[in-house]
């Protein structure tokens, strides 16, 4: 009997046994496992949407609104403090483009 490597194992949220990370249903107890993200909607478990974050970064990036939306309060305050220099605006545009070019899985892994 071979066991999967530690990188491809997760634990069932109902019975606690180790199962394959790709399993949707636990083979031991039969309980459906929660998804880490919803690829159809682009929404992670935290409820943060990649497209909304990108739009906030492109429109209000100079004020750091996208950072507050993503839960990075400290960075959002830093953007507010330096908003008069227009540097956060440029960085916000770059981050908005990055959010738009990321896959939903990458965004969920980083911000979810």
Image (tube, rainbow, N blue to C red):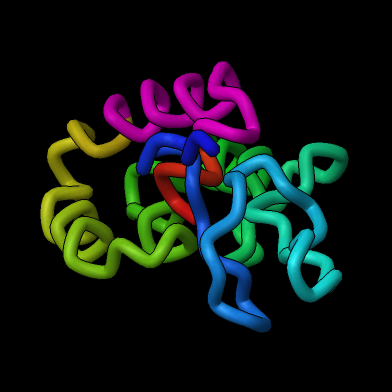
Which residues are the magenta region?
A: 90-106
x 87%, y 39%: residue: 40
Q: Nearer the viewer, residue 79 or 15?
A: 15
Q: Quadrant of residue 50?
A: top right
Give x and y (percent) for residue 104.
64, 34
Quarter of the image with the N terminus in it: top right
Q: Is residue 1 above or below residue 101?
A: below
Q: Is residue 18 left or right of residue 82?
A: right
Q: Is residue 93 above or below residue 29?
A: above
x 51%, y 30%: residue: 99
Give x and y (percent) for residue 66.
45, 52
All told, the count of numbered labels is 0
Extreme residue toward the front, this view? 1
Q: Nearer the viewer, residue 32 or 17?
A: 17
Give x and y (percent) for residue 84.
17, 47
Magenta run includes residue 102: yes
Q: Is residue 110 left or right of residue 74?
A: right
x 36%, y 43%: residue: 6
Magenta run includes residue 51: no
Report the predominant secondary structure element of the magenta stretch: helix
Q: Quadrant of residue 51?
A: top right
């Amino acid at each position: 009997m071979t066991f999967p490597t530690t990188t491809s194992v997760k634990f069932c949220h109902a019975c606690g046994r180790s199962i394959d990370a790709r399993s949707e249903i636990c083979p031991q107890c039969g309980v459906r496992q929660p998804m880490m993200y919803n690829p159809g909607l682009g929404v992670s478990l935290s409820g943060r949407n990649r497209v909304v974050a990108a739009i906030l970064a492109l429109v209000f990036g100079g004020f750091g609104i996208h950072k507050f939306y993503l839960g990075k309060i400290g960075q959002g305050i830093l953007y507010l403090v330096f908003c008069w220099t227009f540097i956060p605006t440029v960085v916000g545009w770059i981050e908005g483009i990055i959010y738009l070019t990321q896959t939903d899985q990458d965004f969920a892994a980083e911000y979810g």
